Amino acid sequence: MTSESFFTLSERIDEVFFFIGAAVLLIEVLEAIFKGNLRKKTLMEMLASASTQIPFLLVEIFVMTFAYGVLYMVSANFVSWQIPTTWVTVIVALILVDLTYYWEHRIAHQVRLLWTQHAVHHSSRDYNIITSIRFGPFESLWALIMHIPLVLIGFAPDVVFGCSLIVLGYQTWLHTEVIGKLGPLEWVLNTPSHHRVHHGADAKYLDKNYGGILIIWDRMFGSFQVEEERPRYGLTTDFDSQNPIKVWFSELPALMKDLRNAKSGQEVWMRLFGRPGWKP
């Protein structure tokens, strides 16, 4: 196996998860029609979620393409100890990428500057498959930074990015309420039940269940919460807009206001890198 062939395989796996997500979306829509719950607001929320792909893809094309290219160049010219691409090393890489995703995700909830991007994903009051593609424009930049150490220790960039694609693709089917709890799988894998908790704005559900594919990281690092009552989705602050521009940049106006009103360099630092909601 080569790193290039693995990346091609990861794209195929991502397509499989896309079709699974499309099937779940069809079930969600049919269920809503049957129950009479398919409201105009729900459709507008779906469109708002889908619209986030516009700035996200523009950043991917004009910013991230260059960033990815730099990382490939660094790997080719300065990392001479590349780990061979075999099924064993790919499995190890997938586990490490999934662990990296856990911390990338957890830190994005704890640092306000990063939260301005990730909050876009959490801002919908609805919870359905379309929520899975609701991204902040610059989320992939933080993801790239977090995965640099895996390239520097010798994993080929194609292997790292291929594993990242699988981890993200896997999470597509988690964004639904039509799938209940899955028995013994709940102990090891991230499931729709676990991820519904993650999107909950209830106090008991906040900052829980960060895992990508495996939920064992949350169990190991003390961030696990089982789903009990149905979560209240969205942000803890009031946000109920379907205006695409407001959705794309929902957290930035408040951050800019706080930075303008900051009275010291320390306050500027904490406003940027402290927890969301930090006040002097």
Image (cartoon, rainbow, N blue to C red):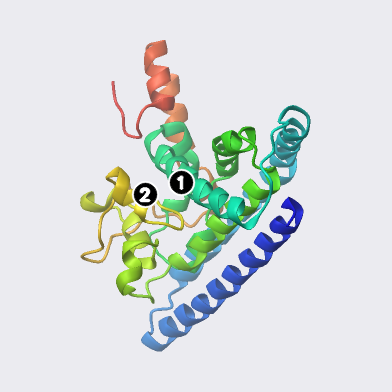
Residue shown at 49%/43% (left/top)?
100
Where disc 1 sits, the SS reads helix
- Distance in Å between CA atoms under marks 2 and 1: 7 Å
- Tell me which corner region of the image, top left, top right, bottom left or bottom right, holds residue 138: top right
Q: Nearer the viewer, residue 262 or 99?
A: 99
Q: Nearer the viewer, residue 61 or 160?
A: 160
Q: Can you give x and y, in whole percent of width and height, for residue 172 in the image?
A: 51, 64
Q: Can you give x and y, in whole percent of width and height, for residue 45 in the image?
A: 48, 63
Q: How many marks?
A: 2
Residue topped by disc 1: 99
Horizontal side, residue 221 vs residue 174: left or right = left
Horizontal side, residue 64 vs residue 220: left or right = right
Q: Quadrant of the C terminus?
A: top left
Which residue is most to the top?
Answer: 264
Q: Earlier in the sequence, mark 2 or mark 1?
A: 1
Three-letter amino acid code of the residue under disc 1: Leu
- Confirm or deny contact between disc 2 and disc 1 (CB under 8 A): yes
Q: Quadrant of the N terminus?
A: bottom right
Residue shown at 38%/11% (left/top)?
264
User: Is residue 26 in sight in this rendering?
Assistant: yes
Around disc 2, counting alpha carbons within 10 Å, would you say few (fewer than 14), some (14 to 19), or many (20 or more)?
Answer: many
Q: Nearer the viewer, residue 201 or 48?
A: 201
User: Is residue 207 in sight in this rendering?
Assistant: no
Residue shown at 30%/73% (left/top)?
183
Residue topped by disc 2: 217
Q: Nearer the viewer, residue 19 or 241?
A: 19
Three-letter amino acid code of the residue under disc 2: Trp
Q: Can you give x and y, in whole percent of width and height, for residue 276 in the image?
A: 35, 34
